[in-house]
Amino acid sequence: ETAAKLKLIEEASQALQDDERAEKNRIEMRDQNRQITANGAQLKGNRDKSLARVTKFQNKLKLFKGESEFSAVEKDIDGVDGSKYVSELADSLMEAAGVSLKLKEMPAGVKVCTRLRATYGEFSTALADAIKKAFDSCPNTDLNRRRFLLRFCVELVLVECIPAR
């Protein structure tokens, strides 16, 4: 019985540490998004506007799996000018949500959304619309994806990446 109590205490301690780490990340992302709101989006530098590069970037977002691919996606965010395709970028990311992007990798998805928001001013609105469209088009029987989309939406609202409307 003592071993069981110790194991339970250890699991609770681990869960608390995980929750504290998640909350710390959430606070950092919220601060970042508040800075973006205050300073505005910054599309700067020499960026590739070619349709081929933008399409490749969209495909990368559609298949985004999480933290392991974040640096490659971040490089594309900094190197591709998708300003004419903001809603398509948001739709592409929502195609990955709950399919290739799983629940444990949600923080990486939030980071990508924040980076895109920092780059394209209208991304927040496009992302909110894309989430609604993805949720509405998701069959009622696909409960896992619907749950993921709801949690993703809540996480994005909590870090102030999309407006709570």
Image (cartoon, rainbow, N blue to C red):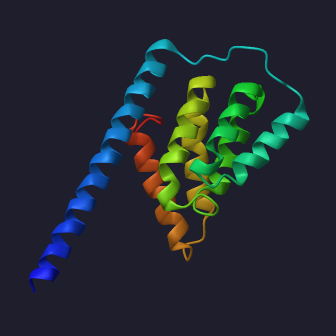
- Dividing the picture into quadrants, the one containing residue 85 is top right
The answer to whether 151 is drawn above or below residue 146 in the figure is above
Residue at horizontal 57%, vertical 29%? 117
Whether residue 165 appears in this view of the structure is no
Q: 39 or 60, which is in the foreground?
A: 60
Find residue 86 and report its horizontal and vertical position in percent.
70, 33
The answer to whether 16 is drawn above or below residue 160 in the figure is below
Quadrant of the drawing holding the N terminus: bottom left
Whether residue 154 appears in this view of the structure is yes
Query: Across the whole image, how many numbered discs are drawn on residues?
Result: 0
Residue at horizontal 76%, vertical 29%? 82
The answer to whether 69 is drawn above or below residue 86 in the figure is below
Q: 115 or 131, which is in the foreground?
A: 115
- Dividing the picture into quadrants, the one containing residue 9 is bottom left
From the viewer's perspective, is 112 left or right of 11? right
From the viewer's perspective, is 24 left or right of 144? left
Find residue 20 and report its horizontal and vertical position in percent.
27, 47
Q: Residue furthest bottom?
A: 1
Q: 8 or 33, which is in the foreground?
A: 8
- Dividing the picture into quadrants, the one containing residue 13 is bottom left
Residue at horizontal 85%, vertical 35%? 53
From the viewer's perspective, is 95 left or right of 39? right
Q: Residue furthest left?
A: 2
The answer to whether 68 is drawn above or below residue 72 in the figure is below
Residue at horizontal 59%, vertical 52%? 66
Quadrant of the drawing holding the C terminus: top left
Find residue 95 and report its horizontal and vertical position in percent.
67, 55
Q: Residue furthest front?
A: 3
Q: 128 or 22, which is in the foreground?
A: 22
Find residue 56 and report its horizontal and vertical position in percent.
83, 42
